Image (cartoon, grey):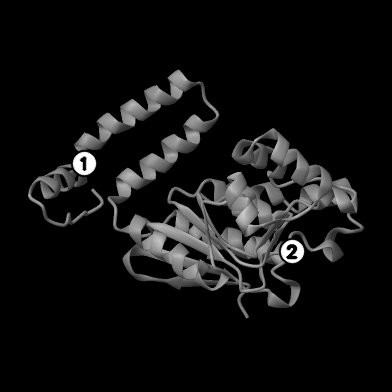
Amino acid sequence: MSLVICEELPNGVRLLRLNRPEARNALNTALRQAIAEQFQQLNQDDAVRCIVIAGDEKAFAAGADLKEIVDDTPIDIMARKVRQFWNTIECCPVPIIAAVRGVALGGGCELALQADIIVAGETARFAQPEVRVGVMPGGGGTQRLIRAIGKYKAMRMVLTGEPVSGTEAYAMGLASEVVPDEKVLDRALELAFTIADMPPVSIRLTKEVTMAGADAALNSGLLMERRLFEMLFASSDQKEGMRAFMEKRKADFSGS
């Protein structure tokens, strides 16, 4: 059975379902590799316009599989090449939406943090509990959390390991939206289809400059934004989009 099920949905939307339910989608090496392989393929596919990543109703992903790493040495951990796994997702040129139901713990929370939009169920649980087993977040948790929710909320999560619910995650800025648990995937897909209906070059460049500017000086970010804005006037989608708006009709974007 495939550890990651990829569904090709209309308009370039792809749904990735983590499929290790017996371990609450814990991120062992095999599952990490399967996710990375899917992203490697999708990153090269120009037809892809948005990716939704989901688990099941009980777990988005329950973090690292401790049975696999408990006796590892530092060299063993390095050999697992976990950073390369995260890089494959980080380099994705199209928007990623995380549909989070159930638990998103440790690496599962870090996986959600790699997304551009997080749709959380009301009773979902986000946590970085690594300190409770003698380590610390190693997949971006200390860095992405503090940028997403600020020092004091991030410190509470990484220093206590205590979980927050989907409702709490939304209130603190860790989730884009919170919806009833049974509507999480539907809402994530609704957002994905909305994005997929937009001009794809504009979407890709918008994601690129937003992420690049997040850690840049304001003036540098503004310069990047302006240059890409100007460049988009070379696209046929810009002409089509503006003309369709003036003519009060639906635009037909070609992606060029």
Which label sits on residue 210?
Answer: none
Query: In x, y percent, where is residue 253?
Result: 21, 54
- Give the residue at x 45% y 70%: 186
User: 247 left or right of 199?
Assistant: left
Taking the spot 49% from the left edge, 50% from the top edge, the residue there is 92
Q: Between residues 177 and 195, which one lies in front from this camera angle?
A: 177
Residue at the extreme left: 247
Q: Where 14 falls versus 236 (above or below)?
A: below
Furthest-top residue in view?
219
Categorize mark 2 by other alpha carbons within 10 Å: few (<14), some (14-19), many (20+).
some
Q: Position of residue 194 (x, y in %)?
A: 34, 58
Measured as percent of width and height from the top left, residue 116 is found at: 50, 49
Q: Quadrant of the N terminus?
A: bottom right
Picture quadrant where residue 252 is located: bottom left
Res 59 quadrant in image? bottom right
Asked whether the viewer can see residue 88, the reply is no
Q: Is residue 91 left or right of residue 127?
A: left
Asked whether residue 155 is in view, the answer is yes
The residue where tag 1 is placed is: 235
User: Label 1: few (<14), some or many (≥20) within 10 Å?
Assistant: some
At 60% from the left edge and 54% from the top edge, which residue is drawn?
112
Percent x, y of residue 226: 32, 26
| 2 vs 173: above or below | below
In the image, farthest residue toward the bottom = 1
- The amino acid marked with disc number 2 is Asn
Q: Earlier in the sequence, mark 2 or mark 1?
A: 2
The residue identified by callout 2 is 28
Name the foreground residue: 112 vs 57. 57
Type of the residue with mark 1: Ser
Distance between the alpha carbons at the discs numbered 2 and 1: 43 Å
Seen in the picture, residue 43 relative to 190 is either above or below; the reply is: above
